[in-house]
Amino acid sequence: MSTVLTNQELLSQNQELQRQLDEANDTIEAIRTGQVDALIVKAGGGHEVYTLKSADQTYRVFIEKMAEGAVTLDEKGIVLYSNLRFALMLNLPLEKVIGAKFETFVPAAFREGFLYLMQRGWMAETKGEISLSNVYQQEIPFLLSLNTLPLNGEATLSIILTDLTLQKETEHRLKLQNEQLKEARQNADNLNNELENIVQERTKDLFMSQEHFKFLADNIPVIVWTAYPDGSTDYFNKRWCQYTGLTVKQSIDWGWQHVIHPDDLEKTIQVWKKSVETGQPYEIEYRFKGAENGQYRWHLGHAIPFKDESGQIIKWFGTGTDIEDQKKEMEKRDEFISIASHELKTPLTSAKGYIQLIEAYQKEVLPVTVKTFVKKANDSLNKLQTLVNDLLDVSKIQAGKLEFGVERLNLGNLIITCVENATHIYPKSLIVNCYTGDFIVTGNFERLEQVLMNLISNAVKYSNNDHPIDINAEQRNGYVNVSVTDRGIGLTEPQMARIFERFYRVEDKKYLTSGLGMGLYISSEIIKAHGGFMSVKSVFNEGSTFNFNLPLI
């Protein structure tokens, strides 16, 4: 039997339905605008909407975008709110996290420690390290920062979770690096690169956690500093303060100038201002005055810009690594090279003279065997002469005495001469002159010939005879670009980054070559002295193109 409702009852039901509809619309609008972070469904009593109505939208976006995980627990340990970052850390969908008991993510071995942290967190701000399990049952180390948070009139527990995986791995790598440094101090450059990478990676990950960044910066054995986009510094770590005796307040802005060696100050400011203007990485060697003994020590300064999504620089992060011991070792090595090369030059010249006298001997016919030995001795002396000349060039470059006369010259004549010489020296290789035109530059013919012959020699060394070696030149933006292209072993990205370094050699089991790794370094310095620059493009196992660029008249 159907029940007939009165008008009053229908009106009451209509009002109730309207109230529920308004409530649903409010819920949908709250979710859409970001006011609602979670829905908790309760059996029997309808649903209850949990909102952060007092939360600022900017703060919400900050929580959602931060690199750390963030959760809010009620007094029973139920997850009332979680940002997406925390769910991703556990490889879980967000709906599997919200409403779950947080303790279920804690491995059995860490539960007692977590319960202790949670108990302390309800009483005062607390930090501690535990591991959590992701969906694959893998344990991830976290730093937990716990604090109470009043929410909608009720006390909740807010937890910020920082993934320590990278930090643990970094600590392990640093330990290995320190062990290697004890065995060979020459690995200091590798350590500096590692520390630089660590600083760069950590500053990106921990940018929003300033205290965590400061903790890291204060506990690594290098100077760390940060600066605003305009170049004025705003932070120095403890290492800086301990070494210079200056406080952070005395050092920030441009106060750091007081401890720079007077001879290095002008160059330091110029290089730093250029990096600030161009956004290019900052790198320089300068001397800092130590507070303990008043002595200056060499440091390698390096800084990189941190940019936002639009490419605008919002911060500079810099390091300063003590390289005093390395500089002294390099000075000793350069001094030894200079002395050794000069000492070798005299007996080498004498030996070449004696060989020439033997070759010119006419009183009687020399046996074929003797002529063969004389030729081999002469070839060996020529190779030794090349090495000694390279050592002398390096000594001159380091002493700033690489001097030579310059004149107007046609690069076409230079290329023709080098191709003809290389064809005689390497008869099995096909060396092709692809150059057409006349490019006039100011330079030294012999030094530029030395550069081009070095590039051709390297192309022959690291490629087979099945493919030609192309020599070309063309005009680019007021410069003439001379290139040597081979189809040889090519270079990897790390090799290309170091190919113009002094004493660096590309090792390949297939191509056994001699030399000290100075040719490209010397060539690069010669081109720099001509007002130009060198570059390389390469694909591993496919070939390389080496270029030098000279300003056109």
Image (cartoon, helix red, strand yellow):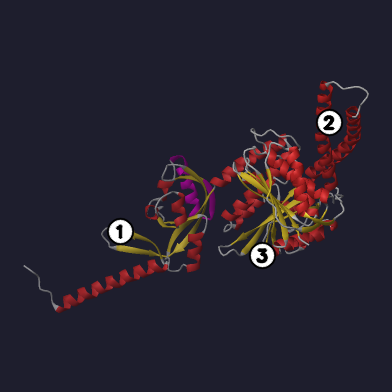
Q: Which residues are magenta?
A: 108-129
> Magenta span: helix, strand or loop, mainly?
helix
Indicate the position of residue 545 as horizontal and vertical percent values.
66, 48
Mark whose residue sits in front, 1 or 3: 3
Mark 1 lies on residue: 42
Q: Which mark is residue 259?
A: none
Q: Earlier in the sequence, mark 2 or mark 1?
A: 1
Q: Nearer the viewer, residue 341 or 351?
A: 351
Q: Residue at x 58, y 57 (%)?
A: 209
Residue 60 located left or right of residue 230: left
- Mark 1, Cα crowd under 10 Å, few <14 / some 14-19 / many 20+, is few
Label 3 Cα crowd, 10 Å radius (few <14 / some 14-19 / many 20+): some
- The image quadrant of residue 422 is top right
Please state which of the two labelled residues, at mark 2 or mark 1, is closer to the viewer. 2
Residue 218 visible? The answer is yes
Camera-nearest label, 2 or 3 = 2
Amino acid type indicated by mark 3: Pro
Does dot 2 land on a helix, a strand or a loop? helix
**Disc 2 crowd, CA 10 A, few/some/many (<14, 14-19, 20+):** some
What's the residue at 73%, 36% (across, down)? 184
- Residue 135 in the magenta stretch? The answer is no
Name the image quarter holding the C terminus.
bottom right
Residue 378 — which label? Answer: 2
Q: Quadrant of residue 381?
A: top right
Q: CA distance from mark 2 to mark 3?
A: 61 Å
**Residue in the picture at 50% in, 67% down:** 58
Residue labelled with disc 3: 229
Callout 1 amino acid: Lys
Q: Quadrant of the N terminus?
A: bottom left
Magenta-drawn stretch contains 113: yes
